[in-house]
Amino acid sequence: MRHSMRRGLVLAALAGTTLVATAPAAFAQTTSPEAFGIEGTGALGLAPTPDATLSNPNPATVPSVGIPLILNATALTASVTTNSATATVGGLDTTGIAIPLLGAITGSTITSSCLVNADGSFVETTSITGLNVGGTALAPGTIAPNTPFLSIPAVATITLNQQVAGPVTGSQTVNAIHIDLIGAAETINIASSTCGPFSADTPVASGKGLALGLGLLGSVGVGYGAVYTRRRRAPVL
C-alpha cells in the first residue's frame, strides 16, 4: 500500500512538474571530456550543473542546487583536462523538502573520476561517504562498477558507480549515483565524469594566457633585436 501511494505521488508530482517546466525535456550529452555535479533528464529538465568542459568554465563550482521533491545537493565542483574528468558533490540531503519521494536522503563527499590512457584503456572510480536513502545505508568500502544499491518497487532504482559508454566513440562515462524514476522517464545523475578518446595534443593557450604568452615572446624578441643592433653599430677597433 505504501509503495502504491508513493508511486502515485511520484507520477502526480512529475506530471505537475511537466506542466510548468520551461527547460528542455532532456539534455543529450555530446562532449568529452566533461564533468558535472548533477543532472536531471526528463520532466525535471535540470541541465548539467556545474558543467565543466574544455570550452566551458573549468574548473566549475556551484554552492547548491535542488531538485524539487527529490533532493538538495551542495558544494558541487567539476573539472576536466584533455584526458581526464572529475566531479564532486559535497553533500546530499532532503532538508526543507515536504514530500521526499525517495525517503530521507543524506550523503557527503560523492566523487567520480575518469582517466583515459594512451592505449585506450580507462580508469573509472567512484567514492561515496555516508550515503543513506530511505533508511538504507551504504556500507564503507570499494564500490564495484554498476552496483545496485536500492530498488523501491514501482518508484525508483538507484545504481552506484555506473559505468557506461560515453557520448562519442572511444569515450566512457562514470556516474557516482544514477537514479531511475520508474514510470516517469526521468533519470538523475550525481557526480558524473566523462573522458576519452585519448588525445596526445596539448590545448593551445587562449584568451588572457595567449596574450601574456605573446607579450613575453614579443619582449624577448625586442630585447634580442636591440642587442643585435647595438652590436652591429659598435665601432670596429
Image (cartoon, rainbow, N blue to C red):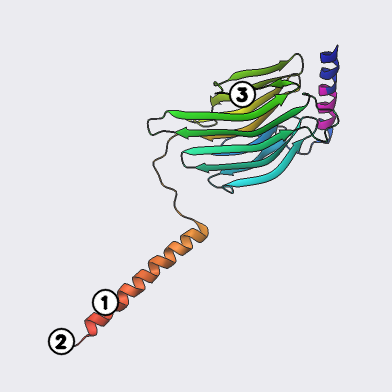
Q: Where residue 202 sits: x, y (%)? A: 41, 47
Residue 228: assigned label: 1
Alpha carbons under labels 2 and 3: distance apart:
79 Å
Q: Residue at x 55, y 38 (%)?
A: 86
Residue numbers of the magenta segment: 10-17
Name the kind of residue labelled 3 in the image: Leu
Residue under label 3, please give it: 160
Quick one: which residue is furthest to the front in this view? 140
Q: Where residue 195 sits: x, y (%)? A: 50, 35
Residue mark closest to the camera, 1 vs 3: 3
Q: Is 136 positioned to the left or the right of 229 in the image?
A: right
The answer to whether marks 1 and 3 mark residues whose Cβ atoms lie closer than 8 Å is no
Quick one: which residue is furthest to the top in this view? 1
Crowd rating for badge 1 (residues with CA inside 10 Å; few <14, some 14–19, many 20+):
few
Q: Looking at this view, is 203 or 78 the one in front?
A: 78
Q: Mark 1 or 3 closer to N-term?
A: 3
Q: Is 106 positioned to the left or the right of 4 in the image?
A: left
Alpha carbons under labels 1 and 2: distance apart:
15 Å
Q: Residue at x 31, y 75 (%)?
A: 225
Name the kind of residue labelled 1 in the image: Tyr
Query: Relative to residue 182, is residue 53 depicted above or below?
Result: below
Residue 214: assigned label: none
Name the kind of residue labelled 2 in the image: Val
Residue under label 2, please give it: 236
Q: How many discs appear?
A: 3
Write down the quadrant of residue 73 in the picture: top right
Alpha carbons under labels 1 and 3: distance apart:
65 Å
Q: Mark 2 or 3 closer to N-term?
A: 3
